[in-house]
Amino acid sequence: MFSHTQTFYNKSIRNIVIAFGSLFESIYIVRNDENGVEDKKIRVPFEYGNKEKFIWSLTKETTGRVQITLPRMGFELTNIVYDPARKSNRLNLKTSYVSGVYKKVFSEVPYNIGFSVYIFTRHMDDMLQIVEQILPYFAPEFNITIKMNDVHQEVDVPIILNGVSINEDFEGNLETRRSLIGVLDFTVKMNVYPEICGSTGGIIERSDVNFYEKSCIGPGNYVGDIGYTGNSVTGSITGVTGDWSP
């Protein structure tokens, strides 16, 4: 346990972060002209980063006219909490035969991972367009299927939307850039897996078993070997003397 010479990395948490981020990487907003006709379609950039980093980028002083482009979205992992309600027997063993290797792993450990998604816009209409493209999929849960490792090929992972908040910054002088910040809090119910062991031995698919017994018929008289194979009985009875009854 906690060996310094051997290590393992199933990438369970990394797979969850990648899968969660992929849900929001293709969000667009539409800008209309003065006649209400669609003028252009803008893809909203999405990246990993904390809230303070984005706010600093929005408010920092610049020597030129270049500022961060809005709208923009980001997300970050906020916490990892053990979930005792989903605990199972730790000695449960799951096996799989992958590419000629027999692999096995003991029971997973349940954890809830918290994520926060941040939305930064200048216009309220942009904010509402983005939010309305996300909310309908969460009621409040949305399931995704992920390959976690060689043994757990298809795992259903629930993602729960806990809440949405939208804040508008009114502070500052007239030259201060207006910004709207939306925050969506999520909980992902995932599992962390222990070390996966593997061997080249194959899985036992068939076994042939023969049962034999020795019995006596009559007092002190040895009968012999009687073999049972499937539905047939084979063997011989020898040395029977005296009176006997079955």
Image (spheres, rainbow, N blue to C red):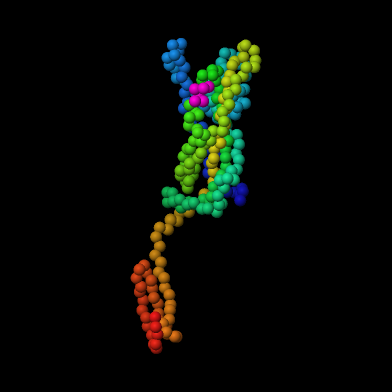
Residue visible at 43% across and 16% down in the picture? 38
Q: Tell me if I can see residue 31 in this picture.
A: yes
Q: Position of residue 92 (x, y in %)?
A: 53, 53
**Residue 142 picture location, percent across and down:** 49, 35
Q: Is residue 173 magenta?
A: no
Residue located 56% across and 22% down the image: 120
Q: Find out whether residue 130 is within the magenta segment.
A: yes
Boundaries of the magenta span: 127-132
Query: Which residue sits furthest bottom?
Result: 242
33 shown above or below 51: above
Q: Residue at x 44, y 85 (%)?
A: 219
Q: Is residue 170 left or right of residue 47?
A: right
Q: In terms of image quadrants, where is residue 229?
A: bottom left
Q: Nearer the viewer, residue 23 or 203?
A: 23
Q: Is residue 220 above or below residue 85?
A: below
Q: Quadrant of the C terminus?
A: bottom left
Q: Main secondary structure of the magenta part?
A: helix
Q: Is residue 137 above or below residue 225?
A: above
The residue positioned farthest toward the right in the image shown: 172
The structure residue drawn at horizontal position 57% and vertical position 31%, both measured from the top left corner, is 163
Q: Position of residue 62 (x, y in %)?
A: 61, 16
Along the viewing direction, whichever of 158 and 56 lies nearer the viewer: 158
Q: Nearer the viewer, residue 1 or 132?
A: 132
Picture mark count: 0
Q: x, y percentage for residue 123?
A: 54, 17
Report whether residue 9 is seen. no
